[in-house]
Image: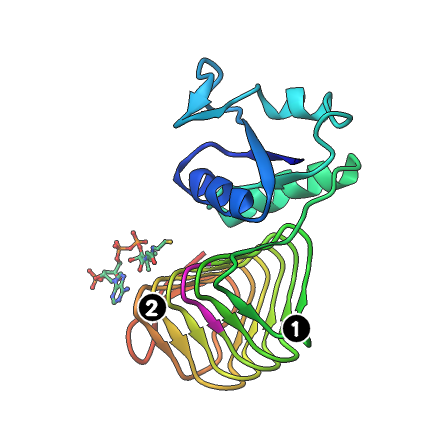
Amino acid sequence: MKKLAIVGASGHGKVVADLAELCGYQVVFFDDTYPNKTNVEHWQILGTLTDLLNRIGDYPNAIVAIGNNSIRCKLSNDLLSNGFKAPVLTHPSATVSKYATIKEGTVIFAHAVVNAFAKIETNCIINTSVIVEHDCVVGNSVHLSPSVALAGGTKIGELSWLGIGSVTKQLIEIGSNSIIGANSTVINNIPANVTVVGSPTVIKKIK
Ligand SMILES: CC(C)(COP(=O)(O)OP(=O)(O)OC[C@H]1O[C@@H](n2cnc3c(N)ncnc32)[C@H](O)[C@@H]1OP(=O)(O)O)[C@@H](O)C(=O)NCCC(=O)NCCS
C-alpha cells in the first residue's frame, strides 16, 4: 500500500487522513505542536517536521494538512524543496473535469465540482460541496470553505480564504491574502489583504 505522511494532526489533518485512505494511502502523522502525543485518533504521530525531513526514504509522499494558509504554504514549500512529492487527493464523490488543472498538494473533498478549464494551484483546500466553475483560477494555498461557489472565470489570489457558503459573481477578481466572510456575496473585485463580509460585501479590515 502507498504511504503518505501528513503534517498537522488537528481537525483538518484528520479529515485529510480520511480522504487519503479513500485514495488508497496508508497514513501516518508528523506534527511539531504535539511533541508528547503518539496518536491522533487511531493514527500514529511519528514525530516532528524535522523527523519527517530525515525520513524521506520511508515517506517520499507528504502533504501538509494545516488550515492556516500561510503556514500550510511555508511548510509545503519546505517539503517540496527537500524533494518530497505532494499528491493531489480527490474524494471519489467529487467531480473534476478532465480539462481542469489541479496542482500538487491540493485536496478536493466530497461532492466538490471543478468544471472545465478551471486551474487550481498548489496546496489548496477545496472543501466539501465547493463549486469551482469553468475557467476559474485559484491561487497557491487558497482555502475554499464548504459550499463556496465560484462563478465562471473568478480569479482568487494566493493565500486567500473564502468562508463557508460564500459566492462570487462571474469574472470577479479577489486579491491575495484576503478573507471573505461566511455566507458573503462578492459582486465587485476585492483587493489584496482585506477582510470583507456581507451581501454584497463591504470591507471590514485592512491588514
Ligand atoms: C470574516 C471572519 C473571518 C471575521 O472574523 P473576525 O476577524 O474574528 O471578526 P469579528 O467576528 O470580530 O467580526 C467583525 C465584524 O464583521 C461582522 N461579520 C463577521 N463575519 C461576518 C459574516 N460572515 N457576515 C456578515 N458580517 C460578519 C461582525 O458582525 C462584526 O461586525 P461589527 O464590526 O459591526 O461588530 C469570520 O466572521 C468568518 O466569517 N469566518 C468564516 C468561518 C468559516 O467559514 N469557517 C469554515 C472553515 S472550514
The residue at the point 51 percent across, 22 percent down is 45
User: Which mark is nearer the camera, 2 or 1?
Assistant: 1
Circle 1: is it few (<14), some (14-19), or many (20+) Cα within 10 Å? Answer: some
Q: Are marks 2 and 1 in contact (CB under 8 Å)?
A: no
Give x and y (percent) for residue 75: 63, 38
First reached walking from the N terminus: tag 2 or tag 1: 1
Q: CA distance from mark 2 to mark 1?
A: 22 Å
Give x and y (percent) for residue 166: 36, 70
Residue matched to label 2: 165
Residue matched to label 1: 100
Q: Nearer the viewer, residue 100 or 111?
A: 111
**In which image quadrant can residue 156 be found?**
bottom right
Is most of the magenta stretch helix, strand or loop?
loop
Q: Which quarter holds ligand 1?
A: bottom left
Disc 2 element: loop
Q: Quadrant of the N terminus?
A: top right
Kind of residue at disc 1: Ala
Q: Nearer the viewer, residue 93 or 88?
A: 93
The residue at the point 46 percent across, 43 percent down is 18
